[in-house]
Amino acid sequence: MRYISTRGRAPAQSFCDILLGGLAPDGGLYLPESYPHVGAAELDAWRSLPYHELAYQILSRFIDDIPSDDLREICRRTYTAEVYCHARAGDDPREITPVHWLDDGSLGLLALSNGPTLAFKDMAMQLLGNLFEYVLERRHDSINILGATSGDTGSAAEYAMRGKHNVRVFMLSPHGRMSAFQRAQMYSLQDPNIFNIAVRGMFDDAQDIVKAVSNDHAFKARHKIGAVNSINWGRVAAQIVYYFKGYFAATRSNDQRVAFAVPSGNFGNICAGHIARMMGLPIERLVLATNENDVLDEFFRTGTYRPRTTAETHATSSPSMDISKASNFERFIFDLVGRDGQVVSELWSGVESGASFDLVGSPYWACIDEYGFASGASSHADRLATIRHCFDTWGVVIDTHTADGLKVALEHRQTGIPMLVLETALPAKFEDTICEALGRVPDRPADLADIESLPQRVEVMDADVGAVRAFIERHCA
Ligand SMILES: *Cc1c(COP(=O)(O)O)cnc(C)c1O
């Protein structure tokens, strides 16, 4: 299996070659040169597999430069009940991603947040940690991961990379701007390969520093600076697995179809659903839900993709979906335009200078229905109402992002088609808004009950590129 760029002007590469990098050299994103097809025989054979073995079966279709036994062992070590330890009472902890039915058999939550940081990003990031360690060991190489976070991604990356050989993480966060719980999650890690840097400023200041350091190509090469952001192909690949798992949980035979509702930001999660569908998984609909930052809902309703500026981006109560443009969206557009890298290059040369594009009237938009997307948006008031409705009707407390997904899912149900809403975080991560909706604090997993009282390890700094650069230099001898 070789990987090609969405802009069509980069040499094809193998999985391990693109695993540690980011964008392709032509500025595009990597995708497999073709999607492996999964037929009825495989669906039958995979239906009852444990999660780790299902992961191996699917990932081995995309990865042919890691020996099978090694890949199988990596999946077995990654998807364990010990790692995904936050299953709810009544769940079988070996399920990894159990379905919690609301309306029996017709509406359910696909629980993706049982990992160490209580958000779905653990599903992919934990695999990435083990893959990075394996590939770096084999290549006698090392990496220094540099990132900026406003919460979920940074903690998922740190918990995935902690203690890994040949990997260090330098994670910038805005000083005093994350919740006490999020701070404790990240800053309480004592592993010597994890470095938390709290920048006096906003998230954008932290992000700008990461960009400045990454654009210094000499520094980047000298210190082997890498990233684990949402465009990483390994993350998308790992996320394909739980669409299959959810499909099997919601059906008895392969002639049945299922819909998934996905709270979306950078289009990473739902891109994996799109690929599962392209592989032949019987998905009737992919229902995309946004919050007030509705750039993707607007596209699927109108055919216009209009990225926003930072100033136009709302800070919402489902903060992990607060995006101005959706970095993984280019992968879907590549498929939509018949995998023509020239067309994608032209569209994105506009996007990168802040322009919109409109596909209405093009032959591409005429085919949009074949891809099964539906969409909708949710506001703060919708979020509160949905959290209340879910609790009053089914006795289940959901987080703010999942609430956006459920709100839009309820607008798109079809008779005879089970609808699974991807639960992307546990409510304990977003206590304030749950309190606002329900007047009570959500339950917190017992092992995290007093995480705020653990000793913290963090370096507080001014928003100064030079200072961050010097810190990295000092710590990656
Ligand atoms: C990252 C995140 C999302 C958005 O996922 P994308 O892959 O960026 O679309 C939604 N909900 C939660 C809780 C997240 O952490």
Image (spheres, rainbow, N blue to C red):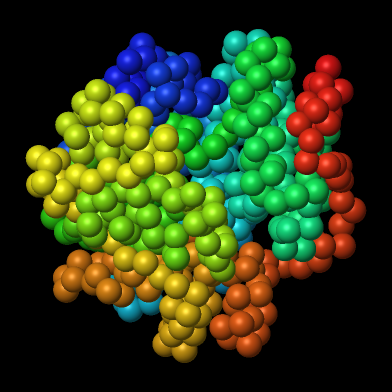
The vertical placement of 191 against 383, above or below, is above
Q: Could you say where residue 241 lies in the image, as x and y percent from the top left?
A: 38, 44
Residue 213 relative to residue 66: left or right: right
The vertical placement of 27 against 103, above or below, is above
Residue 257 seen in the figure: yes
Residue 65 relative to residue 332: left or right: right
* Frontmost residue, 410 versus 53: 410
* Frontmost residue, 270 versus 190: 270
Q: Give the image quarter of residue 319.
A: bottom right
Quarter of the image with the C terminus is top right
Q: Could you say where residue 295 lies in the image, as x and y percent from the top left?
A: 37, 55
Residue 100 seen in the figure: no
Quarter of the image with the N terminus is top left
Q: Could you say where residue 160 lies in the image, as x and y percent from the top left?
A: 64, 40
* Frontmost residue, 65 versus 207: 207
Residue 196 relative to residue 445: left or right: right
Q: Could you say where residue 30 lies in the image, as x and y percent from the top left?
A: 38, 26
Query: Residue at coordinates 33% horizontally, 78% vertically from top-left?
Result: 103
Query: Residue at coordinates 73% horizontally, 28% vertically from top-left?
Result: 168
